[in-house]
Structure formats: C-alpha cells, structure tokens
C-alpha cells in the first residue's frame, strides 16, 4: 500500500507514525511540510498526490488539516487529531463539504488530547457522519494502542480500496 503521510506542525519526516507504517510493510511518502505557510504545505501535498497517486492519505494534526484541504483523487483519508479548526478557511471547509465521502474517512483521536480537543473531531462526526475512534494516550498518538489502531485502519481502508 502506498501512503502519503502528512506530519504535524511540530513533527518532521521520519517520525514514529510513518516509521511504524513503513515497518508494517507499506510504502510511505513523508514529505517535509514547512512550519509557516499552510498553503505551501497544501501545494506540496497536492503535487505529490497528483504525481504519486497514493492509495491512502494520512494526516496528523496540522497534516490532518492539509489532508482535508487537498483533492485526494478518491484515496481514503485517516485523520489523526486533525487541527482543521486552526488552519482551514471557510472556502476550504466548503470544498471539504463537497468532497467528503464519510465512508472513506476515519479519525483517530485521544480523549486525553490537550492540544486539539476531541470535540473538534466529534464535530466532524456529527456534521459528516465520519467514524471517530478514541485511541491513544495524548496528542502525539505514538503509544502502542494508537500505532496499532493506525495500522489496522490503514489495512482496513486498503482492503476497501481493493474491493
């Protein structure tokens, strides 16, 4: 499975989550996203999607907002504690409204997240009918339960794509 992994603001390529997916046998594309310039991060991600056509897009925190702002070309999306309220404009949200396919989006979020409130993900669930899985011990989502849930969700979505 080819995965585009979009890291968060305080992260960088080669972190725990993309490393875990690589060790699980996936091909992980994990570009460096600039700290400043959300639109540049969106452009970088969209260019990779357009050329590499990943099977799944995973976005963590700020990377989750990036994943919501791009056209994934029908690739399913895993959002990890997405920081969408902090980064998406009204026009981004309007575009998401049109593109969102709830059966192709799963959110992983810790109920103990002290950076992005789980209520933000619950709002996505209530508005769009997206599945939200409460896993992990904090915002970093790098504990074993969170990593295993990420790998399981990627595998499950990958099977949906193949069928």
Image (cartoon, helix red, strand yellow):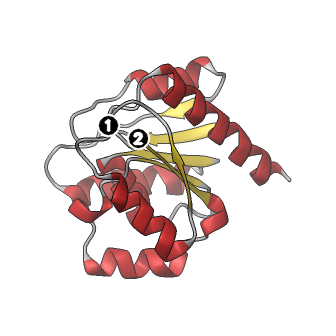
Would you name the residue on which mark 2 appears? 110
Residue drawn 29% across and 30% down? 12
- The image quadrant that residue 122 belongs to is bottom left
| 109 up-or-down from 27: above or below | below
| Label at residue 68 | none
Quadrant of res 85:
bottom left
Which x, y percent locates residue 14?
38, 23
Q: Along the line of sight, which residue is nearer the eye, 32 or 116?
A: 116
Q: Is residue 42 above or below residue 151?
A: below
Front position in the image: 17 or 14: 17
Q: Earlier in the sequence, mark 2 or mark 1?
A: 2
Label 2's element?
Answer: loop
What residue appears at the point 42 percent right and 79 percent down from the top-left corner?
95
Q: Is residue 1 visible?
A: no
**Residue farthest right in this picture:** 163
Q: Residue at x 59, y 64 (%)?
A: 73
The local secondary structure at tag 1 comes to: loop
**Is 110 left, or right, of 33 in this rendering?**
right
* Residue 80 % position (x, y): 43, 45
Q: Position of residue 124 (x, y in %)?
A: 45, 67
Between 99 and 37, the one lying in front of the other is 99
Contact, mark 2 vs mark 1 (Cβ under 8 Å): yes
Question: Could you tell me which quadrant the N terminus lies in?
Answer: top right
Which of the numbered marks, if any, corresponds to residue 139? 1
Q: Position of residue 120 (x, y in %)?
A: 34, 61
Category of crowding for the residue at label 2, using alpha-carbon neighbours closer than 10 angstroms: few (below 14), some (14–19), many (at least 20):
many
Distance between the alpha carbons at the discs numbered 2 and 1 = 6 Å
């Amino acid at each position: 499975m080819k995965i585009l992994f979009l890291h968060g603001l305080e992260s960088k390529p080669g972190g725990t989550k993309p490393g875990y997916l690589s060790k699980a046998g996936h091909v992980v594309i994990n570009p460096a996203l600039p700290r400043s310039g959300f639109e540049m991060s969106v452009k970088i991600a969209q260019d990779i999607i357009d050329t590499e056509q990943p099977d799944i897009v995973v976005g963590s925190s700020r990377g989750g907002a990036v994943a919501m702002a791009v056209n994934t070309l029908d690739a399913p999306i895993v959002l990890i504690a997405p920081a969408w309220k902090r980064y998406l404009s009204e026009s981004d949200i309007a575009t998401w409204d049109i593109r969102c396919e709830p059966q192709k989006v799963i959110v992983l979020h810790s109920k103990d997240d002290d950076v992005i409130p789980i209520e933000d993900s619950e709002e996505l669930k209530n508005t769009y009918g997206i599945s939200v899985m409460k896993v992990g011990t904090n915002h970093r989502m790098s504990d074993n339960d969170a990593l295993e849930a990420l790998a399981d969700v990627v595998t499950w979505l990958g099977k949906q794509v193949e069928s």
